[in-house]
Amino acid sequence: MSTFLIGIFKISPVFLLAGMMMISNIEAIGLFELDILVIAPIATVYAALVAYITEKVKFQDLVDAAVENVKDMQLVFFILMFAYAMAETFMSTGVGASIINISLRLGLSARTVAVTALIVSAVLSVATGTSWGTFAATAPIFLWLNHIVGGNIALTVASIAGGACFGDCIGLISDTTVVSSGIQGVEVIHRIRHQGVWSIITLILAAILIFAVSFGYSTEVGSASEAISSIPEDVLINLEAERPAAVDLLNQVVEGVPFYMVIPLLLVIGVAVAGVPTLACLGIGIISTYIFGMIAGTVQSTTQFLDLIYAGFESAGSWVIVMMMWVGAFGGIMNKMSAFKPLANLISIIARNVRQLMFANGILSIIGNAALADEMAQIVTIGPIVRDLTDQNVVASKEDMYKLKLRNATFSDALGVFGSQLIPWHVYMAFFVGISSTIYPLYDFSWLEFIKYNYMAWIAVVSLLLLTITGLDRFIPLFAIPSEPDVQLKKNLNKIN
């Protein structure tokens, strides 16, 4: 068998994984619906078979490679459990509701409903660390508010999606932020500082564009309580089955919670910016939520609060962590047989300088996201590839190399989360379309409208790539990556020598 065919055979587990994800997520095909928890093990077993055939790798060596790759994520697993626990407490004790109520006090109209949906969902996603939870919590409010005030339903739902993913890209407790940072070997707080200004700028630009598109609509004001009371009972039942904490949050928005319930969020943000370790930040968030929740009456007892923490641990352990372990094992076996080496070699040959190499890392992240149809699968599979590409091809000081790692982590996360919203067959798209139809059955939602009107995703993806390749990132505080002559490709140095 030729080297080319062997290379194709080695990469075939990715095609299998991607194909199953695509077929499972395109409802129109209707062949089968498989969860990533089933797809990942199938792909992992097939990858092990390919490794044995092509490299004669022993079974125990394959197991060791898989376990070693998963072992690197141990700290991430603990962070994720506490992150999910804090998200659950924020959603159920009034922290999330206080954020929404503070934001809605100014009143909403058809002209402002979409841009407000973007901003509120962005803030809530940072607070809870979950894009799916944020979307489930805010979509019922803003879709029915949009119905009452007569706004653009497609623009509003796409704005909710864009804002909901904002926290997944920069949130301290987001699983994608934590995992992408861990794989690249950078601190989460350093990641947030690195991309913070850029992220806020993209949010502001998206808000301006959404408001401009909505400018011709009415200015008649609506209310959140009226919108929530208009939600049909069967819709609430379906929503509770999908996301129980979202229903708790909706009820708290109607009943009202003390505005000081936002303090736990402010504390978490404050200590994070101060450089406190991630686990300590999460602990402060959970403890402060308990204290203020007891004062406000949103926490009825210590037992009830511990149940929320347990629910968060259970949610993380029953799906996210298990999924990460399988996908991590898949990546370990793929790396063991150097399946991505031909692609990495091609990039290293084509790239003429460090910026071009970094730009290629970004493109590779998007391609991986589209191929795997799951942003976490992309992060744990493609993340190590872009890390190794940088480590093996770039000569730089320890400080400059760290900045490149920060950008690689941003690529994995931002192009994974926001890029997912521009891919029709992605799991994100299936979730957003599905839950929107459940929440607001009066409209026939389609993936095309999510892509067309998601200005937040378009601005984030395009700007990140352009700023990287052009070097214009130097005009954004803390966001610049080093260029020649501070950093060099090893092949260029070899030519000089």
Image (tube, rainbow, N blue to C red):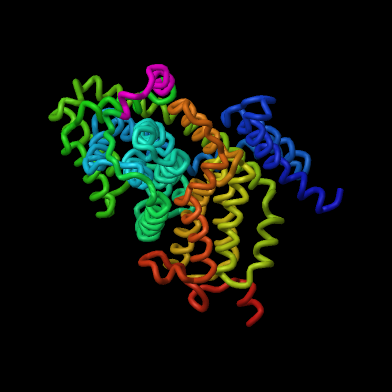
Q: Nearer the viewer, residue 324 or 497?
A: 324
Residue 307 sits inside the magenta stretch: no
Residue 151 placement (x, y as % from top left): 39, 40
Quadrant position of the C terminus in the picture: bottom right
Residue 341 placement (x, y as % from top left): 68, 55
Q: Relative to 471, does residue 40 appear above or below in the rendering?
A: above
Residue 54 in sight in this render: yes
Q: Residue furthest bottom?
A: 496
Residue 352 placement (x, y as % from top left): 63, 72
Q: Which residues are magenta?
A: 227-240
Q: Relative to 141, does residue 382 appear above or below in the rendering?
A: below
Residue at x-position 66% and y-position 25%: 32
| 447 sits left or right of 266 in the view | right
Residue 82 in sight in this render: no
Q: Nearer the viewer, residue 133 or 81?
A: 133
Query: What secondary structure do most residues of the magenta stretch adopt?
Result: helix
Q: Nearer the viewer, residue 285 or 44?
A: 285
